[in-house]
Structures are given as structure tokens and as C-alpha cells.
Amino acid sequence: MTKTERLETERRVFDIYSGILFNHLEFQSGPADPPAYALDCPEYETLREKYGLVKLAGKGSAFQRAKRLLHHLAPRLTHSSYYDNHVPCDALSLLEYSYERPDQGINCLNKSKILTECCLAVGIYARRVGIMPCSPYDNDNHVVTEIYDPDLAKWVMLDPSTDGWFVDENGGPLSLLELRERFAHRQFATFVSSTDRKDNLSRLSDKNMELNTYFCKNLFWLSVDRYNGFGDRKERFFFIPDGYDLERNQIASLEYRLSVLLEQGLSPEEEQTFRQQFQDALEKLQTAPKKSCHDAAALAAPPAGC
């Protein structure tokens, strides 16, 4: 397949995902209270001093400062899909484990936690956001960071796994909600990395079409940390499209993952272990309180005081 053929194939796949978003633009209604943001956690002083965050961030707008932190951290954090989340989920512990240690990679969930806390530590409002696919048979999702820039009067997405963000046709940075809306209507938006030249955005759109498609796939529903500060309280706000039954899809996803494992020719002992894990996960899901949907207005609202 030629480069041109690959690009055309990727564009067709993108159109499928953008069509799914178009048909699910509206989110379910719910409480609109915003996430909480802590800029004064005592651990931030250690984080700032140990990693020189104030100097790294430099001067300028929140977006400019956050971009510098992003570009410093991204290449120094190796990605590993097999990371098992055994390190406490806070920037100090995660950086101690993974910073400039290519043999100790971490996943996007924890990379975004690092960037979020580093931004908060230098006074930039930031939050960790999970972006999720529609299909229960798609076990691949992503986690990124959004920062609030008072000068732009909006949230902006930064991805520490790819060292980049998304822009419109004028080069303006986008929030996840803006990106979702643009993708759904097939309006111009493209990923750009910190190292990309930004003088030809159409060319960059072609170059980064695979990433554009990947984000389009994963922007179906969102989850946001309720508390954004030092450490992980494991409390989330969920933003789910109208008509989408999240629990039903999560059960289907569990069943799918089990079926894939059983197709691998496991020993009787391994099969029994996986079946028990499935039953435990299914019981936990069925007995847990139903996830309440949050109003999407909470995602667009500025932090209190901004």
C-alpha cells in the first residue's frame, strides 16, 4: 500500500468515527458542579524544587508555561502498556520511578497524572481526563491533561504521551469538547507536536491523520478526576452521551475480553483463573452504584476564581 493509499484509508476510518460522534453529540444531563482543584498541596514544594518546575515552566501564559513542562516531561517518560499501576499515583512517586528511566515505563494514565500535578504545582489549573471509545469490543482508550488558560478563557488539552495538542485552522489550541465538536462536524482540527513546524497545518493534518483518527475514536465519552491535587482519590465525574448505557457496555466488554482470552488455548488452570476473575469483575460491576452522569457544562466552566 502506498503512502497516499494509507492516508485515504485512514481518512475513511476517521469519517466513520466522526459520524459516530455526530450521532451522539449531546451528553446526558446531570449535576453541573465542577471538579475541585488544589494549587496549594504541601507536596508541591518538594516537586517544584526537586525537578526545577518553576524554571522549566518559565514566563508567559498558562498555555505557554504548560507547553514547556509538557515538552520537558514527555520524552523523559517511557511508555509501557504493560505497566501495572503498582506505584502510588502521585507525581513524586511516579517521577521517582520513571523519570529518565527507559527500563521503567508507565502508561498514559500515570503520565497525565504527572503533567497535571506539575502544572498545579506552578499555579496552572489542570485536570486528568480519560477519553473513551464507543465500542465495548475496543479495549484501547487514552488519558490526557487539560489546563485552563485565563488569557484564552478556555481549557486546552495537552497529551504527555505524544508531546502535543490539537489546533484549529488558525493554530488556536483546542479543548476536548471543542475537538469533539469539530470532529463530529468534520471541521478542521489537527494534532500538532511540540517539535512540528506549524506553518502548514494542512500538511500536518495529513502527517498526523493516524493520531487525529485515534483521538476521534476515543472521544465518545469522558471521565474526569473529581479532585485534582496531589494523589489520586479515585473519584471520577462521567460525561456520557444520550442513549448510551455505560454499564451494559462495560458488561459486554468484560464478556468480550474473557472470550478473547479463552481463544488462546489456555490450560484448564489458567482458564479457571480467568473465569473467576471475570466473575469477580462482573459481580463488582453489577453491585456497584450506577455511575451518575455529570453535565457537560462542568467541563467547559472555568475554575472558581478565574
Image: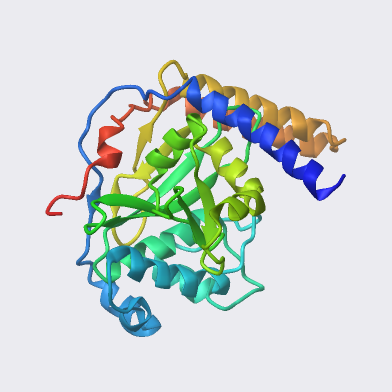
Which residue sits furthest left? 305
Q: Quadrant for residue 4, please give it.
A: top right
Q: Is residue 45 visible?
A: yes
Q: Is residue 86 visible?
A: no
Q: In front here: 66 or 11?
A: 11
165 is higher (above) or lower (below) than 68: above
How far across and down, in percent of the image, does residue 193 sit? 54, 62
Q: Quadrant for residue 239, please give it.
A: top left
Q: In front here: 188 or 115?
A: 188
Q: Is residue 36 shown left or right of residue 207? A: left
Q: Is residue 85 shown left or right of residue 148? A: right
How far across and down, in percent of the image, does residue 175 sit? 38, 47
Figure coloring? rainbow
Q: Is residue 306 shown left or right of residue 296? A: left
- Residue under the point 70% across and 39% down: 10
Q: Is residue 167 shown left or right of residue 197? A: left
Q: In front here: 260 or 23?
A: 23
How far across and down, in percent of the image, does residue 165 sit? 47, 56
- Residue under the point 52% across and 75% down: 99
- Residue under the point 66% across and 25% down: 255
Q: How many marks?
A: 0
Which residue sits furthest top? 243
How far across and down, in percent of the image, does residue 182 sit? 45, 36
Q: In front here: 102 or 231?
A: 102
